Image (cartoon, grey):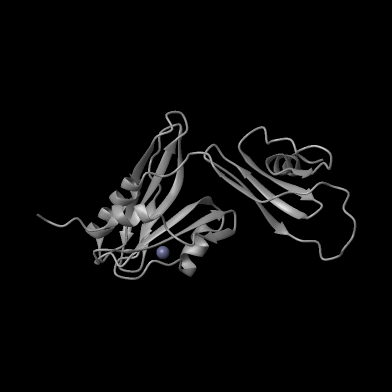
Amino acid sequence: MNAGDLALQRSFPTVMVPRREPVTPMEAAGERLLVAENGVFLEIDLPWLSVVRRIADYSVPTAIPYGRVAERTVLRCGQVPAHLIGAFVEMARAAHPLETGAWVVWNARTREFRLAPVRVLSQGTGSLRYERPTLLVDELRVIDCHSHGAHPAFFSSTDNEDDRHETKFAFVVGNCGSSVPSMAMRLCAKGIFEEVGRVPSSWYAAARLKEVA
Ligand SMILES: [Zn+2]
């Protein structure tokens, strides 16, 4: 086969899921397609996250002689410390009514998290243009945070467009002038968007405006 298609297929292989044994784990970070008896699944394997989601069903009840696959999510990096969310909310308050952004990154070697502010190119009350933060060798983005100034937290059509090709959690803070801001979070996995029903209560506690003594 030609070199171009070979490279593409190597970067995103398709696996026939066996019936009598578990599917072989991925050898390196990346993505693959699993063709199973119960549909076609996308598997994404990263040092901080492993995710499997069904992306297609069969439209004909034909017999597929492969094994079944279950959707799963494994957050390998563990829970994100609430104080980093608190620190981002502080940034969002300082920028209010303008928007701002930062990444929560995880170091795969030290297993520590930190907040890495983006380099803002231009910011408005409904827009933000930025450059990605400079990360250390072993650092990976886990949460892409941005603020909505005085507007509520939600995912706009611009956010949908920005998040379409990426694998990350996206987090929005809104009503930044309020003592308890609004928050929204979702998992983005190469076009799959899953909004998290409830942001952890520890994040709201960390985001509460500290009373000035
Ligand atoms: Zn937004």
Residue farthest top in this picture: 109
Q: What residue is drawn where x is 87% and y is 53%?
A: 64
Figure check: 163 above or below 115: below
Q: What residue is drawn where x is 35% and y is 48%?
A: 82
Q: What residue is drawn where x is 51% and y is 58%?
A: 163
Front position in the image: 201 or 90: 201
Front position in the image: 207 or 144: 207
Residue 74 picture quarter: top right
Front position in the image: 49 or 102: 49
Q: Would residue 58 appear left or right of 163 to someone viewing this image? A: right
Residue farthest left in this picture: 213
Where's the C terminus, which quadrant?
Answer: bottom left
Residue 153 picture quarter: bottom left
Where's the N terminus, which quadrant?
Answer: top right
Instruction: From the top left corner, tell me how far across and down residue 102 is, in percent.
Output: 36, 50
Instruction: From the top left corner, tell me how far across and down residue 175 is, in percent.
Output: 30, 68
Q: What residue is drawn where x is 66% and y is 51%?
A: 71
Give the total number of marks visible in the rendering: 0
Q: Give the quadrant of ligand 1.
A: bottom left
Instruction: From the top left corner, tell me how far across and down residue 113 is, in percent.
Output: 39, 39
Q: Would residue 48 appear left or right of 135 to someone viewing this image? A: right
Figure check: 112 above or below 158: above
Figure check: 118 above or below 211: above
Q: Would residue 122 appear left or right of 21 to someone viewing this image? A: left
Residue farthest front in this picture: 201
Instruction: From the top left corner, tell me how far across and down residue 98 is, in percent.
Output: 28, 64
Residue 101 visible to the viewer: no
Residue 26 visible to the viewer: yes
